[in-house]
Image: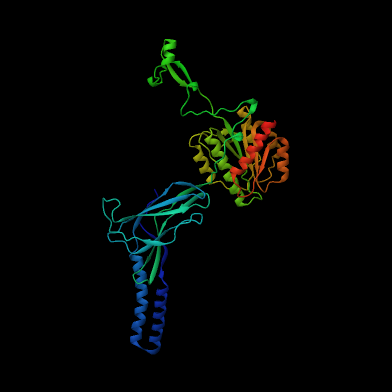
Amino acid sequence: MAGRGRAASPLKKPRPTARGWTFGAVGVVTLAASAFFGRTDVLFVGVFFTVIVLAAMISVTVDRPRLTVARSFHPDVVAVGEKATIVTTARNLSSRPSPAARWREFAPDAIQVQPSAPFPRLGPHQLNVSHGRDTVVLRQDIVAARRGSHAVGPLIVSRTDTFGIAYAEYAIGQPRQLLVTPRVVPLRRGELDVAHSEGTEHELQRHSIPSADELIAREYRPGDPLRRVHWRATARHDKLMVRQEEQRSNPEAWLLMDTRAGEATEDAFETLVEFIASIGVHLLDNGFVVSVVETGERQLGGRSGAGRSGTLGSSTPTYDVGSADRLLLADLAAVDAVAAARDDAVAELAAGLRRAGRPVPVFAVLLCTTPELGALAALRGMGDPAVAFLGPSVDPDVEEVLADAGWLCVSFETGADPAEAWQRAALRQRAAVTHG
C-alpha cells in the first residue's frame, strides 16, 4: 500500500480567487477614497471588503482537510498502452466532518489521470471502525503511455471557502510507484526458437509435471520420503526403490541488445525495447534460459545468482523459466540509451556461446553500427539460428557484412510490429533450412 501521511502540507498557499481579488481591489480603492474624501461610512465598506478576504484565507488554512491516504494499483504492473485502476482510500482524521473540497491525483505526463472532481464529505473520525462514514474509496482508470517507474500521488485536495473568496491546494500522503513495462507482442512459435544443429533439435524440458521417461529409479536411502517409492521398480529389483527426476538443463538462447545512444531517435529505441521484450518473453515461455548482452553500460539485473560469467569477470544478466518473464520486463522498464558504449559486448556474447558447447539461438537487435562488426559476424557458426534485426539508423554495410557471414538479417522501422518482423525472419529461416 502507499505511504501514509497524517498532516496535509500545502501544495499552493492560500490565495484569493478571482472573486477574492475583486473584493480586495474594491476594499483598497474604497479605503483610498475614504482617506481622500474623509468619509467614515466609506471607510467601513473598505475595511469590510479587505477583512473578508483575509478571513477567507485564514478559513481555508485552518479548516483544511486532515486525511490519511492509501493507494493501490490493479494490476500493480502494466504494459505500455494497457489500462490500470488506481484505488485511493482516504480517511478523515478530524473529529469534525471534512469540508467541501475537490480532488485529483498528481502524476507525470506518462500517466493520464482524471481532472479535478468533487471530494465526498466525510463524517467525523471513528475509532476502531474500518471503512465507516469517515472513509471513502476513490477509483479511476488510467492508461500508461510510456514505460518506466512513475510516481503516482500525492493526493491533491483543493479547498475553497464557503463564499468562494479564497482557495488552497494540499498534497496529502506519499506517492507510490507504478511500474510500466514495455509492450509485449505474442510471437509465433516455429523455426526461430528451435535450434537445428547436428540435425537434431533442442528438447525443451518441462520440470513441473515430468513424464515417466524423465524419471529414474534408485535404491532407497534413509530420509527419502515414502511418497517417492517406485513400486514397480521395487518389485522388479526385490528391494525398496524410489523415483528420482533426471537432471536436465534447459536450452539456452542469447540476445544482443543495442543500448548505445547513437543517431537513433527515442521512438526507435522504444521499438528496440519492444523487440527485446517480445523475443525474450517468447523464448522464456518456450522453456529457454535467456541471457542478454548490452552494447552499452550494463543496466539489466537478471536473476540473482543466475548470471553467466562473461569477460573481465563480469556477469551476464540471465533469466530462467518460471517468473523470469516478469523480472525481464521489470528490468526493461528502466532501460535507457546510454552514451558510454562497451568495447567487450561481442566478446562477452562469444564467451557465452562457447560455453554453450553447441550452436544455440542468437538474436541481435541493433540500432547503430557496432565497432565490433567483424567479431559479431564471426559468431554465425555459434548461432542456430543467428538473426539480426536492424533498425532504421543502421548503416547498410552492417547488413551486408552480417549477411555475407550467414546471419539472417531483417530490417525494421520505428514503430514496427515485432510479430511482423519475427514472421519475416521465420519465413527466411524456413526457406534456408529447406534449401540448405
- Position of 242 with respect to 147 (left or right) is left
**Residue 253 in the image: x percent, y percent?**
59, 34
Q: Is residue 344 visible?
A: no
Look at the picture and state if 3 lies above or below 280. below
Which quadrant holds the C terminus?
Answer: top right
Look at the picture and state if 82 lies above or below 225. below
**Residue 131 in the image: x percent, y percent?**
30, 52
Closest to the observer: 423 or 58? 423
**Coloring scheme used:** rainbow
**Residue 308 in the image: x percent, y percent?**
57, 33
Q: In terms of image quadrants, where is residue 123?
A: bottom left
- Position of 351 with respect to 81 (left or right) is right
Q: In terms of image quadrants, where is residue 282?
A: top right
Q: Is residue 83 visible?
A: yes
Task: Residue at 51% x, 57% y: name it.
Answer: 109
Closest to the observer: 272 or 348? 272
**Residue 6 in the image: x percent, y percent?**
35, 55
Q: Residue furthest top?
A: 238
Closest to the observer: 8 or 415? 415
Task: Residue at 58% x, 28% y: name it.
Answer: 202
Q: Report the label total.
A: 0
